[in-house]
Image (spheres, rainbow, N blue to C red):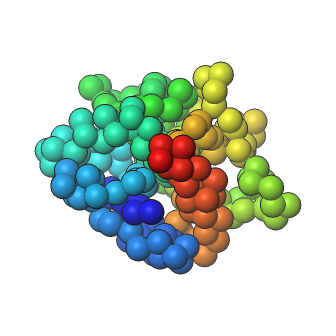
Amino acid sequence: MKVGVLSLQGDVREHVSALIACAINPVEVRRPSELAQVDALVLPGGESTTIAQLSEIFGLYQPIKDRIAAGMPVYGSCAGMILLADSILDAKQGQKTFGGLDITVRRNAFGRQVDSFESDIEFSDGSPDLIRAVFIRAPWVEKIGPNVQVLATVDNHPVAVRSAALLATSFHPELTHDHRIHRYFIEEVARPALEKVK
């Protein structure tokens, strides 16, 4: 399986390292030809509006949107969650997303940079162990569609969700040494979705 990391802005290096720790040799995606090589994609944390704008400049916006609509497995962390959401509250004027995930997110829901925090939370992957979650200007999910599964919550707000081949977290697992989220994406989301296509 070839997994790409959208490498236009944000914590690309950390996601690359996490995937390597999961025995994946990731492709850094900056142009359509690199996107065409991958089976699945990771959208990193960063600035969602900047990533969307740069994806247009680099000719990636529509190809990514089309691949998501066609069923490509995608994992988005923080800004990546916003980019996967079909609807954004407190969006900047004209802000675009790739969409595909039937959720409504609120940007910076937990507060500004100074309000960043870490917490040990439950994650519904079958493990009894808590997972360390790093929240930095993080969104949360305010509304979910009927086919969206909530995998983790903080203060009753969903912070990890999945639907079919799409996974999103409002926190940054790539900033910890716990690679459970990346393994979950590879083994429980991406691999089954790709096997269905074969």
Q: Is residue 189 above or below residue 118?
A: above
Number of callouts: 0
Q: Position of residue 88 (x, y in %)?
A: 45, 28
Residue at position x 32%, y 66% from top? 27
Q: Position of residue 140 (x, y in %)?
A: 59, 38
Residue at 47% of width from left, 72% of height from top? 24
Please give the name of the residue rendered at 52% of the width and 66% of the height, measured from the top-left corner: 174
Of residues 178 and 48, which is closer to you in this image? 178
Whole-percent x, y for residue 105 in the image:
52, 32
Q: Is residue 139 visible?
A: yes
Placement of the N terminus among the 4 image quadrants: bottom left
Question: In this rendering, is residue 23 above or below 76?
Answer: below
142 sits left or right of 39 in the view: right
Where is residue 124? Give x, y as percent. Answer: 76, 50
Residue lying at the far top of the rendered structure: 146
Residue 183 quadrant:
bottom right
**Image quadrant of residue 33?**
bottom left
Q: Can you say whether 50 is above or below 101 in the image?
A: below
Residue 135, visible in the rendered structure: no
| Residue at the extreme right of the image, as rendered | 128
- Locate residue 25 relative to residue 181 in the image: left or right: left
Horizontally, residue 5 falls left or right of residue 113, namely: left
Toward the front, the furthest residue is: 198
Residue at image point 34% right, 40% down: 67
